Image (cartoon, coloured by chain):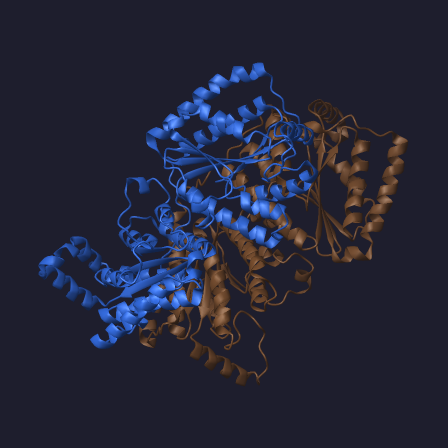
Chain colours: A brown, B blue
Amino acid sequence: MFESALVEHKLGKEEYELAEPELRTRLIEAQLALLERRPFAMIVLVSGMDGAGKTEVMHRLSEWLDPRHLQTVAYGDRDEAERARPAMWRYWRDLPARGEIAVMFGSWYSEPLRDRLLGQTGRNRFERQLAAINRFEEMLSDEGIVLLKFLLVLSAAEQKRRLKALAKRTGGASRVFEEWTDVAHRDQAGAVVGEAVRRTSSNHAPWTVLPCDDPEYRDLSLGRAVLACLQSHLEAVAVVRPLAVPVAIPNVDRRNVLDTLDLALALDKAESRKRLERAQFNLLEQSQRKAFRDRALVVVFEGHDAAGKGGAIRRVVVALDPRQYRIYPIAAPNEEEKVHPYLWRFWRNVPPRGRIAIFDRSWYGRVLVERVEGFASPTEWGRAYSEINDFEEELAEGGIILVKLWLAIGKDEQLRRFEERADTGYKQFKITDEDWRNREKWDLYHDAIGDMIDRTSTTMSPWTLVEAQDKRWARVKVVETLVDRLTSEL
Amino acid sequence: MFESALVEHKLGKEEYELAEPELRTRLIEAQLALLERRPFAMIVLVSGMDGAGKTEVMHRLSEWLDPRHLQTVAYGDRDEAERARPAMWRYWRDLPARGEIAVMFGSWYSEPLRDRLLGQTGRNRFERQLAAINRFEEMLSDEGIVLLKFLLVLSAAEQKRRLKALAKRTGGASRVFEEWTDVAHRDQAGAVVGEAVRRTSSNHAPWTVLPCDDPEYRDLSLGRAVLACLQSHLEAVAVVRPLAVPVAIPNVDRRNVLDTLDLALALDKAESRKRLERAQFNLLEQSQRKAFRDRALVVVFEGHDAAGKGGAIRRVVVALDPRQYRIYPIAAPNEEEKVHPYLWRFWRNVPPRGRIAIFDRSWYGRVLVERVEGFASPTEWGRAYSEINDFEEELAEGGIILVKLWLAIGKDEQLRRFEERADTGYKQFKITDEDWRNREKWDLYHDAIGDMIDRTSTTMSPWTLVEAQDKRWARVKVVETLVDRLTSEL
């Protein structure tokens, strides 16, 4: 990977000063074009050897680009808020909006590389992590974030010299281990980093190896690479990106897992009250357990319109300490959310350890309403299943318990409830023209719900289908499901 | 994954017979459209539970489609020719040409799934294998092969019934283990298969889970899915697929690893003869070792025009048993090769154990001449580096020793040799107008060679750069390099 970067590259000060003004002008022009149309966002990832000039590179970019639209973020050890959440949370939080550029110092590569360099992960686990990174970066590209990755390298002699000078300045204090601190293990580290770089170099997220012995050469190379990347993408965005189109083939008989539900299931008032109270008591108890402080709970409520999500959510939260939970009602994305990848707004609300997040509708909108109404293209919702599975896997690996509930009613019952809502003054706000329009697409929704359950019900985060024709049955099942999951997980 | 497929699906014979003629007509129409323009090839992969009807499904497709352009292949245990080569060799061999359809029974999923089900691979290794499969299938898609994957499933009751009936017919003989033979381990197997299906479902290579309790329902679903897939791709091919465009940024000073070579290195006649003879003797000895019978050798010769590849190859092969080696001179692809993925013709010539294949130019043409001359689009050569690395990794995992040699000369020396060739009657055939044209693009080739070495020199299959200004030096280094690699590998 590094052969040509380790060749001697030297640029005279004169030549640099001759080239720099032109480069800066072009960079600013490109950034303005990016800001004007906001077709994509850009992440410049700065990685590599200690002492090679990562900080200098960040400063140089801040100097060259309009800093109002340039965000520089440096990741060190995780702070308290970050430790309380899944590993990828902080990177999602900082994803730039379309039109903006982010320079990242340290990244999702740091931990896998460090663990591999220290011998704490084997080859298979390392390759698996790299595969997850590839999926993440492909998602970024699909969602309009251009990623440019730099690996800063020094020749052995120069690295030795700089680390010595550094040790002198810091009084010989040992440096924080990052990617390659140690000259002695240079080749070993190079092999591991080289494998990672090769495996994660793709057309949509290429690595550029940056020779750093000569600062002028480094900066000019960096600037030209950023410029070339910006320009080529500014030209390319005009082009449509069809990719492979997923084929949604409804079952020949249109029957799916929803059709197996026994919607006649019901509870009488007395029994339902008894069971609900017991379940609520148990839920409070589980949520107060010491073991829960190291975990978190995310509950997803999805269901047919008028299936009773709101009522069910109320039966859950009355049992909880109000300081512990938050409810997120999910509507169409706002302006800020629209200029970020679609999972961004859900990542933002991932709860820290010990807390509970309740989503009243969720990221599944992508494969339900957005699929049926055409708000997402077939390519977009087609890839969303894997993206959602990856997201939920990250949550699980971060210790989060995820409960996904589908509240199901029949088509007739929905009509009855719509009419009741329309007729009852204080319920009229609950029924809109949109509800009636959705109802006309019942069969398309039926297909989409079936696909969703089939493709996102995993061992780690299965869907629970709740028969909601009888509200009492539904509410009891919802709270009892939560209690069961917490009991078995904690 | 299987929830909706395990719902009861039943189709009356009558309804089936009503729908079938129409379906067949449309399938033949779609196949004719495919044959007419030959925009892509299609693989229908048939996988799933024993007893669910994999054979019947293959027969049904042969009945419905024009069998002259339908190839059905079933993979069982590997035969002798297959065992002698890397695991992926037989699948590459059978890739359909554009316009053709292949139905595959058993596939690259079989071995990873079996090993995982038998507990012989851990989760990390399994995930790593799935990631490799994803890369392979993405390559197929990029190279114009549409992949449609079916997983045939039975309800528990029906599976039990069929296996019982089968046992009766075969006198109770135990069946070969495929994916799910065993009713007792059904759920366990389902979890593993489900994970694989989820992880490898993508827009470009989706899985369709096919409920098989009712044969009529199964066949109609199958036919409709094949039809929908054919139709959607026949419509889509008109559209350009730009994807992310790689940015080739030449080094600011255009210096790369080639510039570190000391082209003055030379040997005098006497020493070179002595060393060459000794090296050739050692090469023969190594190639005759018992240990080599379990391995194979692939030698790639690349280099500047007129660098002396032919002469070097002759110095290698004179030392070898002619029954053991074959030389493959690589020119522009022929008609048959053009309708297959570009690595196909190299996979065909992967040598079996104990043999040697010598490539006079190779798959690296993709990132050299095809890149520089624009025969491959930036997207195509941009992704070729990873594809080549994956290919060579498969070779290495199959026990093949790969030696890659770059023969380097300077621009002046090349001119001298060109002129000499033009002036010498028996050498004139060696020099063409194309050589002179390539020479004009010396700098572009220089960049491309540097990128190639940087991005494909791996620990397992590094490039060896051979200073070829002095032919004697070059020939000795080539043969000695082979001896060294064989000695250290065997």
Please state which of residues B170 and A291 is positioned toward the viewer in this rendering: B170
Q: Quadrant of residue B124?
A: bottom right
The front one of A85 and B353 is B353
Q: Could you say where residue B470 lies in the image, as x and y percent from the top left?
A: 22, 71
Q: Is residue A425 left or right of residue B295?
A: right
Looking at the image, how many numbered discs can be counted on the residues? Answer: 0
| x and y, in percent, of residue A286 in the image | 82, 50
Image point 59% across, 43% down: which residue? A333
As displayed, is residue A135 above or below residue A417? below
Q: Position of residue B298 (x, y in %)?
A: 37, 57
Q: Is residue B304 visible?
A: yes
Q: Quadrant of residue A223?
A: bottom left
Between B306 and A192, which is closer to the camera in this rendering?
B306
Determine the residue positioned at 43% across, 42% down.
Answer: B141
Q: Based on the displayed image, in which of its 4 quarters is residue A442 positioned?
A: top right
> Do we see residue B252 in this rendering?
no
Q: Is residue B308 above or below residue B266?
A: above
In the picture, measured across the screen, residue B336 lies left or right of residue B29, that is left
Quarter occupied by the N terminus of chain B: top right
Specify whether B433 is left or right of A484: left
Give the position of the C terminus of chain B as an image quadrant. Answer: bottom left
Horizontal side of residue B6 vs B247, given as left or right: right
In this view, B124 is above or below A449: below
Along the viewing direction, whichever of B423 and B456 lies nearer the viewer? B423
Q: Is residue B244 above or below residue A187?
A: above
Q: Residue A362, position in %: x, y?
A: 65, 42
